[in-house]
Amino acid sequence: DSIGQLKQLRYLDASWNVDVPEPPEYPDPPESTMIPKALGSLNKLQYLNLSFRRRPIGLPEVIRKLTELRYLNTSFCEGYYLLDSPSANQSFIDCIGTLPNLEQLDMSWNDYVFCVPESFSRLKKLNLSGCNQISSLPENVGKVDIPRLFGLLDHPLENDGFHVRPVDSGSGSSLVWLKHTNPDVLCIDDLQNVKSVEEARSIRLMEKNRIETLSLKWHGGMEHIELLTVLMPPSSVKNLDIRGYMDDICPHWFMHIGQYLPNLVSLELCHFQCNSLPTLVQPPNLRKIVLRHMENLEKFNILAKLEHLEIYDCPNLRFKLCLPRAVYWYISRSDNVLSWGQCAWNTASSCPVSELKVDSELPLCHWSLLHQLRGLRDLAIYGCKDLTIPSWRTRSFTSLESLLLYGYHIHKLPEWLGELTSLWRLNLCLGNLQELHKNMRQLTQLQSLSLEKCNKLTSLPQWLGELTLLKTLKLYGCNGIISLPESAITNLQELRISVCHVLFEWCKLEKNKMKLAHIKEKVFVLNRSYVLVTSSFV
């Protein structure tokens, strides 16, 4: 209690050292969590930090005496106690509200139930980030911070936005707290907790014309269409993300999304129940579409010109009219997109796809999609079990400049690899690959070769030296390779060897240092903690 003698003290940092082990549970806390009554005699105190104090005891009777306090930090506390009561949470919060000169209050990550008092509306700064058990927030308090709602609009650690929770003993939800907000970015999660359409209507989402990025997320629940109808986004939205929508049909504004959201640039849909989506013709600024986990989706026609299209886990999706005109495609576990609709695609020979990434076990011979991508320059294939295709189908690959093959089912390289005469970059991550096929000698334009986790590969062929334009060689986790053929390194300008321990030792030998001396850039990585970038060994 000697602290009470510091009558002129204005600044006190009494935060708990987070490096010290947590104090035990109440009712037997260590002395360090007791708030001495003498603290209340510091009537000049203006700054007080009590953060990370888990369960302080005796606070309300002390706090109400600190009438000169301007700044108070009680972040990361789990509840407040009196000596004769197991809980004094609300009485402590109410005491804070009576401090006449308080300007800034940080209550972030206070993990307990409490009501925000009306008096908090006069604070200049309030932080409630991570306070996930607030039971009520007065409307006049919510008006104070329109852009952020005191940190409740964003989750600092998970970046997943505002979580709708039941409040008022379960008769309502916290969605109504958004009535006066108008941020640039808004993510509303747990919409299944909304109690009525009137709650959604009360926030007037369509009028929040500052919003450019909007996310709406459900995790179960029913009657989503009524809620999504009312939650029509403002026309200012550029990025829209909707997840967990479980109704079979979509509201009118969504079916005519180009008309209602003329500024839309990016659309992401995940876990939709619908089996069809509107034909996208009108959105003049739409550049990116992402579809995830839409098992029922069968029909989606995209006539708008895109830059970016990603499709994940949509096994029944088929493009019936024509291929989406997107420059970049990523297709994952959506085999119908790869294999169905040859007749419908006969007129799509000018499809502008230049970069395609596919994650699928479907044999390559069934990828009829490739027939329409004559201008393809960059192709990445993940997990395909069979890369064999008839020779006449390799015409789709003649323009390829970059190729990545990734998987553990492939034991030898496909015959068509040697026909890629325009290829200048080749990345192979094939765990069971046993050799580099001699048809690679025809890749006369190859400039960069990367081998990753090719553990069955025991050597590099001498004929690599015939590829005179090969300037970059990268090896990662290829522990079977114990040396580099001299012919293969003659023209190299860059050599990167990562987690190849035997090969690293070979490179350190004096006679081999001379062989590598001409290479301008050499990078050797033994593990994450050892990286050597050098033009010569030391």
Image (cartoon, grey):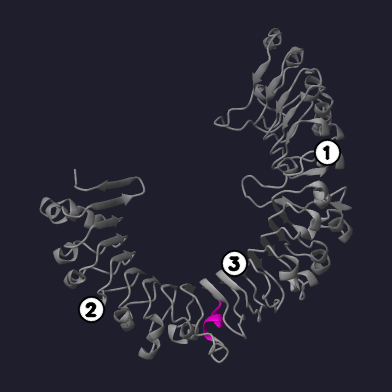
Q: Give the residues drawn in magenta, as a range.
A: 334-339
The amino acid at mark 1 is Val
User: What residue do we see at 73% from left, 42% from top?
Assistant: 131
Residue 338 lies in the magenta stretch = yes
The amino acid at mark 3 is Lys
Residue bearing the label numbered 1: 141
- Residue with the most extreme left position: 511
Where's the C terminus, which quadrant? top left
- In which quarter of the view is residue 140 placed? top right
Q: Callout 3: helix, strand or loop? A: strand
User: What residue do we see at 89% from left, 53% from top?
Assistant: 171
Front position among marks 1 and 3 = 3
Residue bearing the label numbered 2: 438
Q: Residue 107, image x and y in percent?
A: 72, 34
Residue bearing the label numbered 3: 288
- Name the N-terminal-most of marks 2 and 3: 3
Residue 451 in view in this figure: yes
499 relative to 488 in the view: left or right: right
67 relative to 330 in the view: left or right: right
- In which quarter of the view is residue 303 placed? bottom right
Residue 47 lies in the magenta stretch = no
